[in-house]
Amino acid sequence: MKKFLIAAISCILLYLLLDTAYYRWGIYFDFHREQDIEVFAATQGKEILLDTGSGMEPFEIRGVDMGVGIPGYFSTEFAIDKETYLRWFGLIQEMGANTIRVYTILEPDFYEAVYEYNKENPTPLYILHGVWVNDYVQNSHVDAYDDSFREALLQDCRTLVDVIHGRKKISLGYQASSASGVYTRDISDWVLGYILGVEWEDVTVAYTDHMNTEKNSYQGLYMYTSEDATPFEAMLAEVGDHMIRYESDKYKEQRLLAFSNWPTTDPLDYPPEVLKLFMKCAKVDVEHILSTDRYKSGQFASYHVYSYYPDYLAYYDSWKGEVPFAEDYRLANGDYNTYGVYLEMLTRHHKMPVVISEFGTPTSRGRAQLDAFTARSQGYMSEQEQGKALVDSYDDIRRAGCAGCVIFSWQDEWFKRTWNTMANVDLSKTAYWSDFQTNEQFFGLMAFDPGEKRSVCYTDGDVGEWTQEDLLMDNGNLRLYMKYDEKFLYFRVHKDDFDPENEKIYIPIDVTPKSGSYYANGEDVKFDRQADFLMVLDGRDNSRVLVQERYEAFRVIFAEDYGEENPYFNIPDKNSPEFRKIYLALQLGMVNALYEQDKMSEKFETGKMTFGNGNPYDADYNSVSDFYINGDEVEIRLPWQLLNFSNPAQQQIHDDYYEHYGIENLRIQSIYVGAGTSGGKGARIKMEELKLNGWGRKPTYHERLKQSYYAVKEKWT
């Protein structure tokens, strides 16, 4: 008995030693005989093959990326329940999609829903599952060989394998980007493969390569590196090899595998002017990561590619001569479809299948990037325009020879932030209101509109939803009504015998008690309170919202990026009568540009108002419209952030910038609004109080499929 125990303990210790040697040091002792490995998805050349019961056949991935946010909750709260997932799966499959991509380990309800939806489904929805690396790890542990980076990634890979096989319990607090719970549903029959990592920070890649020059090779049981590999690529090969080995040993299965990538770290060669202009300093080339015969499934290349950023080819004068197929992408106006050209450059570079695992455009009112050639910009796109952009991008992806694509994303996500508006809002409260100025919140094919079943107002010319309780001001022949919800402030103006093309209506708005003016230079109008904003209704094509210069957030944040002096060197008076146009930053000054015109920054006048029907249930709906005129009636909707609300859920606005040297929050109880025409003999527009109650952390919302959903459905089905 004693000898038996000693032998048993010795075997256990030897196993642990060998296991530790492999997972920690990369040393592998191969005592395995060839195993029968189950594979239902594999690669062949540049194709993905799938066995649905009749043997391996070509399979085109048509997917949607699914986030984890719903209104009122942040992503790390994992608030979506099984019933919601099941409903969404049905809508996604009706659209013609066959795949869902998720980025990290979700709550058990997701896996329960996948199992329940697919178990009796002859045409199941397949899953591409990600392994997440959070921003903190990338930016605080810039060296990918740091234990907090590499070891955490190895552990997360093993955890995910157990999760999809229904054999894992994850404790609360395992990691910030992962859910917790008991995972008992085996969904491995429908998991096509894994996408490891995220959009790599170029600095992380470059620093890793610079600091670990001796670690530029890896030799594993399933994956190894070529002679040209970099240390970062060797780290990826090691992680992929470990994940394949873990699943092969424990579950006798293998799946497709990819490493996340994007243009910032793509493997293509560019001339010095592009490298300098975009500060492109790193490459990740998965062609340097090779597979042994033991890996039966196969590797594909995964890229996030959007048409508007970064468009390297737009700044690369000689690429047309170096790319023989460029003329195939010439547009009718003589420009080139640089998105299509770039995609084909990627597929021609790779010997393995290429999947565009993120592409899309947002339906926000705000914009962050302009697509100069194909009109697929990052924001200020109507739902119809989004649908056309998705279909056109899909055509480009197919034409380039990609093996599939995944639309970003299924649902809008209120909690998201964007670089050019994030300073304007309270980032700890973004989940509680819909910020139409922040483009990242509106990539979805499904919208979350305020209201439990319908919004409180639709700006469509039908004033039946307005009541006497909404009346704010009555001047006889001119009346002003107001209401609000989690997305908009709504205005209704009635003007007897209104002639919109020859008559102006002014709407002054007093938001902050700290500043404002009784009149506006350049406009024949005065107010009985100090206004911070002035809405000028001047026909269908020339209406806009102006801001008093003391309360202009754009100047405070971006003045120096646009060639102006530091805003604190010349502080505007609190009662300055100068009202300015309202802008969003698109492209900050490129001080390293070769040409003078490229040093200039781009900006977008977001205060310019768009005429159109704001009712999503009407055929002529324009989702980015601001106002509609029907005879003597004008209906208007303005997003909260446009009026410097940082958190309307709790009635918070921007405090005085020059008292606090930046944006701080100030809570208010009401705003004052009026309406009138030109002042004439010194008459002042009377402004009345609109009380604000907010809604705290409990916004109302309802789901709505966007027009873009139906455009994709028509294409895919």
Image: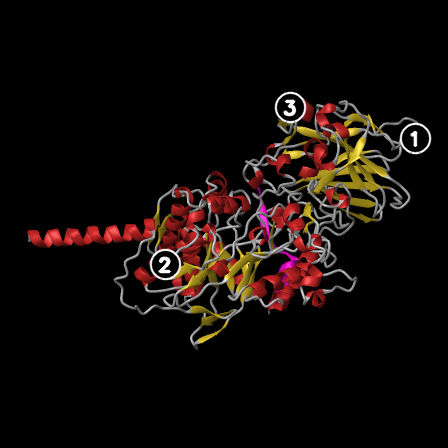
Along the line of sight, the residue nearer the viewer: 703 or 463? 703
Note whether 690 is above or below 307 in the view shown. above
Quadrant holding the C terminus: bottom right
Q: Which residue is mark 1?
A: 680
- How far apart are the two marked residues, 2 and 3, measured between alpha carbons? 57 Å
Give the residue displayed 74% in from the left and 39% down from the top. 583
Determine whether label 3 and label 1 are within 8 Å by CB.
no
**What's under tag 2, amino acid-wise?**
Gly
Along the line of sight, the residue nearer the viewer: 536 or 596? 596
Is residue 708 in the magenta section? yes
> Mark 3 against mark 1, which lies toward the viewer?
3
> Mark 2 against mark 3, which lies toward the viewer?
2
Q: Which residue is mark 2?
A: 220
- How far apart are the two marked residues, 1 and 2, measured between alpha carbons? 83 Å
Which residues fall within the magenta stretch? 699-712
Q: Horizontal and vertical percent for residue 369?
A: 68, 48
Give the residue displayed 86% in from the left and 30% down from the top. 521
**What's under tag 1, amino acid-wise?**
Gly
- Residue 468 in view of the camera: no
Q: Residues within 10 Å of mark 3 (few under 14, many from 20)?
A: few
**What's under tag 3, amino acid-wise?**
His
Give the residue displayed 54% in from the left and 37% down from the top. 697
Indicate the secondary structure of the residue bearing disc 3.
helix
Label of residue 660 in the image: 3
Q: Horizontal and vertical percent for residue 225?
A: 43, 58
Q: Which mark sits nearer the N-terminus, 2 or 3?
A: 2
Residue 656 found in image quarter: top right
Colour mapping: secondary structure
Indicate the secondary structure of the residue bearing disc 2.
loop
